[in-house]
Image (tube, rainbow, N blue to C red):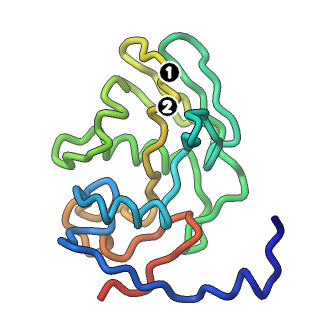
Amino acid sequence: QEETTEQTNMITNIRIPVVAFDTINPILSKNQNIQDVARLIYEPLLNITKDNKIQLCLAKEWSKQTPTSYVIKLKEDIKWQDGNVLTAKDVQFTIDRLKDSAVHSIYAYNVEKVIGVEVIDDNTIKINLGEEVPFFEYHLTFPILSKDYYENEDFVNTQKNNHPVGTGRFKVVSNN
């Protein structure tokens, strides 16, 4: 269904109460309420539909090259809420954070078998696994974070975790 400009502009502010707030960074948060809110701000490479099918989100296509390697091509028109363009380096950065033992992410399991990530070009990334993971594409549902936004920051402790920059439909303007 098409939205008119009037319908699109109707929602300008949403206030969402959250119990036991820890951080809005979905990779760090252990709070289910935050995870639900984060889905409005951050997007994954792929989504899973209600009937358990893969749906493209930030990825425009994906392919299984070998039993242990996947190539993902990103949509080229995606921008972060700060105006920067989403690139394969953002995906690599996110996977590296998920694999970081200091982060303790609820999404670490999704990339547990990843042994390498190659940036092929700005919109293409190759993920190499240490062993075959049946239906690995279903693991590519974690939120992607902006590398540039977190560059030179202490990822776990930065105040930027409470002022996220995502690619989703909603943007956090205040968290008080």
Q: Is residue 30 visible?
A: yes
Q: Is residue 46 visible?
A: no
Residue denoted by label 1: 135
39 vs 175: above or below: above
- Whether tag 2 and tag 1 are in contact, CB under 8 A, the answer is yes
**Which amino acid lies under the numbered mark 1 shown in the image of this protein?**
Phe
Residue at 54% across, 36% down: 119
Viewed as shown, does residue 122 lie left or right of 107? right
Residue denoted by label 2: 138
User: Which of these two is toward me, 57 or 4?
Assistant: 4
**Element class at badge 2:** helix
**Which amino acid lies under the numbered mark 2 shown in the image of this protein?**
Tyr
The percent coordinates of residue 46 (x first, y second) are 56, 42
Residue at 56% across, 11% down: 66
The disc placed on residue 153 is none
Give the position of the C terminus as an image quadrant: bottom left
Viewed as shown, does residue 52 lie left or right of 73? left
